[in-house]
Amino acid sequence: MQRLGFDLLPGEHPIVPVMIGEAPLAVRLADRMQDEGVYVVAFAFPVVPHGKARIRTQMSAAHSTSQLDRVVSAFAEAGRTLGIIH
C-alpha cells in the first residue's frame, strides 16, 4: 500500500489506518471499497482530529494472500480514481 502511495500509520498491529486527511474524501473511498465488496470504515472528526480522517482496515492471519491482493488492487483502483494516489 505504501509503495502505491498510500500513507499508513506505522506499527505492527492488526488495525492498519490508511490516512486520507479530508473527511469527505475518506467517506468516498470507503464507499468505493464497499462497492467492491471490501468492508472498511472511514473515521473522521470527532473520532479523530480534524484533518486526520482515515480508513480503518483490520488485518487477520485468516486472510489469504489472494484476499489481501484483491484488497490492495481495490484500494489502488479507487485511490487513483479519487486522486489520492497517482
Image (cartoon, rainbow, N blue to C red):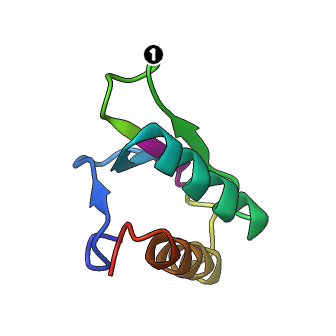
Is residue 2 in view? yes
Residue at position x 73%, y 59% from top? 34
Residue at position x 51%, y 33% from top? 43
Name the secondary structure under disc 1. loop
Crowd band around label 1 with a 10 angstrom C-alpha radius: few (<14), some (14–19), many (20+): few
Residue at position x 58%, y 45% from top? 27
Is residue 56 in view? no
Residue span colored magenta: 54-59
Q: Is residue 85 above or below residue 73?
A: above
x and y percentages locating residue 18 in the rendered image: 39, 52
Name the outermost residue toward the left.
10
Q: Quadrant of the C terminus?
A: bottom left
58 in the magenta segment: yes
Residue at position x 32%, y 79% from top? 4
x and y percentages locating residue 71 in the rendered image: 59, 72
Name the outermost residue toward the top.
46
Q: Left of 20 or right of it: where is 43?
A: right
x and y percentages locating residue 72 in the rendered image: 51, 75
8 in the magenta segment: no
Q: Left of 15 or right of it: where is 49?
A: left
- Return the residue at label 1: 46
Displayed quadrant of residue 70: bottom right
